[in-house]
Structure formats: structure tokens, C-alpha cells
Image (cartoon, rainbow, N blue to C red):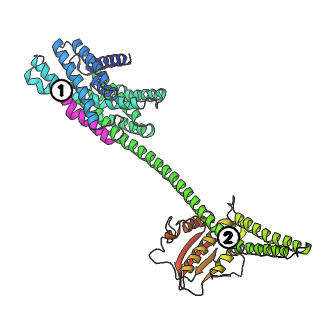
Amino acid sequence: MNNILLVTILAFLYFITGKLSLELLNGDNIINIGVFAAEGIALAFALYFGKRVLLGIFLGQLALALINDVPYIASLLISLINTTEAYLAIVLFQRFGFDTRLLHFRDILGLVGLIIFVLQPFSALSSNSVLLLLHQIPYDSFLHYSFSWWFGNVMGQLLFTPFLLLLFHNFKKIDFVEFFLYGAVFGIYFYILQIELLIENALLLLSLSLPVILVVIARKGIVYGILFNVVVAIIASYSVYIDVGSFAVNSYVDNVINYNLFVLAHISIAFTVGILIEERKTYAKTLEESIATEVKKNQEQQLLMLQQSRLAQMGEMISMIAHQWRQPLNNLSLINQLLISKYTKGKLNDEAMEYFKANSKKQIDLMSTTIDDFRNFFKKENKAQEFFLNDVISEVLNMTAAIYTSKGIKIEFDSQDNYQLYGYANGLAQVILNIINNAKDALIESVQENKKIQISIMKKADDIVLHIKDNAGGIAPDIIDKIFDPYFSTKKDKNGTGLGLYMSKMIIQEQLQAKIEAYNDTEGANFVIYLPQGEK
């Protein structure tokens, strides 16, 4: 039922618009040099709905030809030719991969090329050959009639096919009350120019109508612009019919040709500007979506890096806790052995138990405090706050002292002033810890005898400058520019993640609005952090 309704609608539209086109521009002659709207409507329906509407084209053309006194056989053959033309359009449009949404110049040029160089040459030559063979046109008029047929059909398809295709594809997006209101207002405006004011200069008329169309295209889209083109064509054809205005100053044929060129100018410029604007909008939308996608990917990547960095920090924390616990555990072991020894010798008295109780509790409290210190150290801060730089450095060194002492590494911390900063203290502490851990690893591998890490603070202009340097020989020149890149590591064979310095840089930039850099001095690597001493 849907197909029958669609065929019926198309047949009716083809007949009515075809009859109207012939009446307005060329009387009752089926060969029309003016805009033949029926062909444009037929092609749009064929490209959008496919082969199921071909019968509607056949019936519409057959009725139109018969009512214009074309013999039955000729009418039948011309209807078959027009139906074949539509079928050919469907096949070729799909074959070359053109998009009926007409989103790009390729699609517009493809449609225009098919109309001008394939569909209408086939239709004009074949139909006029039928009329010639059946003695409906004289032999010496064959080329003239073929050109008129070709030109009128080309104009009809260039005007109405894009309009309907865009209308079909944007049907659900269009506010039709606004859409037709815009068309009506522009129609009144152009009617006044063409019919009431009787402007005879076509160039002046073009300069008064085209800028309005271009503004509407820029603001409302190409569908509105093409609607205005249709309005221009209808009112202009009416002016030809009543013989007034710009297309009433020459002979009838010249007037019709000038009218066609006037409409063609609107079509060409409106389409060119419209597609440029639509492609720009599409590009901007695609770019926006791409940026959003990349931002999301980057956020996910940052989260993954953060998780990996956290795992690495947990490993470091466990290692440091193990070092901090080693002495208390040794003490607990000695206390326990002492308790057992007294028991085996029968000397386990109240004094011994009290000693055991007090000292074991002391060691256990020390271990518990260590856990709390590390837990607070790695705890994420919810908001920035004031803190003292010396306190942060001292806290880091207190937690790591056992590790560095066990490796024969001396840490020198020199600062005469305790500078107050604003930001995330734990973030800065993790950065310092990561840098001195890297220095520790480099020193372990070096042949340096007096292994040391030097930490110093100085004020420079509005910045507090923190230096952390070692005497491990420095960073290889060919990699020093890459050390802050994600996943770049010189310790991959030792389970290095390549995220430590990258995350340190992120913390410095995002949490402290500071800057970090690294270079080699005479003894080794020197990491410099520029911390702004600003108000919160």
C-alpha cells in the first residue's frame, strides 16, 4: 500500500508540475526550453526512494504527453524513455558512490555531471528521435527541439532535484512553519521586485535577490537557500507568462533563455556557497568530535598512567616500610629471645615481663607510626593549602634515611630559611621522593666512592628554586631531553615503568603551577624545580 501511495503521489506531482511548467513557459507544446519541474521531481524521487517509484514516472509522463495531444505510441515510448532515464540515474548514482544527502562538492558535481552529460542527452535525443520517426516534428528542427528538451529538463533537475533530496533527508530536522514562512516572506519580496516594481535589468534584480539568499544560507542552511531558488524560479516564470519585468524586454525565446540563465545563476552561486558553508560546519563538527575523542583518550591514558604510577609508588612504599621495620623487628626478635632465655633459666619474673611489655610496645608503636606516616604521605589531598618546603623535604628524608644509609649514600640538605608555599604538599613530596630514588639507583650503579645527593633551596626573584643533584656522573646526552616523556625509562630491564618523571612533571605543572627541568653539571644530574612563592 505504501508503494502504491508513493507511485500515485509521484504520478500526480509529475503530471501537475509538468502541465504547469508547459503552461507558464511554452503553451501546450511538450517540448519546453524553460524549467521543466516534473523532471526534477521525478529524479529526486527516483534517487531517494529507488526503483519502486519508476511506475509513477511512467504514468505521470504518459498522462502529460497524452493530454498534450501526443499520439499514443509516441507517448508510450517517451514515457518508457523517461522511466529508463530515472533507472539509469539510480544505477549510476550508486555505481559511482554519490551520496543523495549532497554533503560534499563531489556529490553535487556528480549529480550535475549525470544530469548534463548523461541523463538529459539520453532523454532528449531518444525522445526527439521517437517524435521524428513518428513524424511529430520536422527533420530540420530535430537539433533545435533536442536542445530545447535537454535545456528545459536540465534546468528542472538542477533546480528541483537537489531541493527535494535535501528536504527528504532533513525532513525531521526542519521546522516547517518557519520554513514556509521564510519562503513566503522572500516570495513577497521578490514578487514586489519583479512584478510590482517591474525591474527590467536582470543584473539589478540578481543583485537584490542573491545576497538575501546567501545570508539565509549562512544563517539557516542550504535547504532554505534552495527553497528561495525555487521561489525565484516560480515567480520569474510567472513574469514570463504575463510578459512583465526583466524577462519581457526581448523576444519570447530570448526572454525564456534569459529567465533560465537568471535561475541558473541563483542555483550555481547558492549551491557553491551553500556547500562551502555546510562543509565548513561539517568539518568544524568533525574536528570538535575528534578533539573530544582525543581528550577522552588522553584522560583515560592519564588515568592509566596515574594507576601505573601509583602501583610503582606502592612498590617503593613497601620497600621503604620494609627498611623502616627492619630495626624494630630486629629489636623485637632480641626482646623475644631474651624472654625465652629468662624463661628457660627460670628467671622470668615481674621485672622481666615489665621490660618485655614496655620495650615490645615501643617497637610496635614505632612500626605503627611508620605505617601512618607512609599512609599520610601517599594520601591524595583534596585541596591546596599552605605548607613549608623544609618540612616536606625533612619528612621525605626521615622516611627514606634507612634505605640510603644501607646503600652507602649520604644525603646533604642545606637550607637556612624555611619557605612557605601554597599548593599540594604531598604531591611535591612524591616528586622529591621520585627524584632522589632515581638518584639512588644511578648511584648504586656508579663507581663513585663518596656517593651523595645534595638538596638545596634558594630564592630567585619571585620563585623558590629547589635543586636536587647527585654525583653519579649525569644523564646520557642523547636521552636527557626524553626523560620527562611518558613510558621512557632507562630501567626497563629492572621493572622501570617510565612514568615516574612524567608524573612528577604533571604534578609540578598541575598541582603547583611550577616548572621542572634537568641538566648535567660537573658531577652528575641536577634537577631544578621553580616553585612560585605567590599568594593563595
Q: Is residue 402 something one can see in this rendering?
A: yes
Task: Please name whichever residue, 67 or 408, is drawn nearer the observer in this view of the structure.
Answer: 408
Give percent across and percent down for residue 476. Answer: 47, 78
Where the N terminus falls, by quadrant? Answer: top left
Give percent across and percent down for residue 486. Answer: 51, 64
Label 1 belongs to which residue? 124
Mark 1 residue type: Ala
Specify the quadrant of the image occupied by residue 323: bottom right
Give percent across and percent down for residue 182. Answer: 45, 30
Q: Earlier in the sequence, mark 2 or mark 1?
A: 1
Mark 2 residue type: Ala
Q: Is residue 244 something one can see in this rendering?
A: no
Q: Which residues are magenta?
A: 97-123
Instruction: Say the numbered circle drawn on residue 322.
Output: 2
Residue at the spot 57% in from the left edge and 79% down from the top edge: 444
Where the C terminus falls, by quadrant? Answer: bottom right
- Residue 178 sits above or below residue 450 on the image: above
Instruction: Tell me if 303 is positioned left or right of 317 in this view.
Output: left
Check whether the beta carbons of the residues at disc 2 and disc 1 lie within 8 A of each other: no
Q: Is residue 101 magenta?
A: yes
Task: Please name whichever residue, 420 or 133, is drawn nearer the observer in this view of the structure.
Answer: 420
Q: Secondary structure at mark 2?
A: helix
Residue closest to the far bottom:
449
Task: Please name whichever residue, 295 or 497, is drawn nearer the observer in this view of the structure.
Answer: 497
Q: Secondary structure at mark 1?
A: helix
Give percent across and percent down for residue 331. Answer: 76, 75
Q: Is residue 409 magenta?
A: no
Q: Nearer the viewer, mark 2 or mark 1?
A: 2
Residue at the spot 31% in from the left edge and 39% down from the top edge: 107
Q: Main secondary structure of the magenta part?
A: helix
Residue at the spot 55% in from the left edge and 86% down from the top edge: 448
Instruction: Say the numbered circle drawn on residue 448.
Output: none
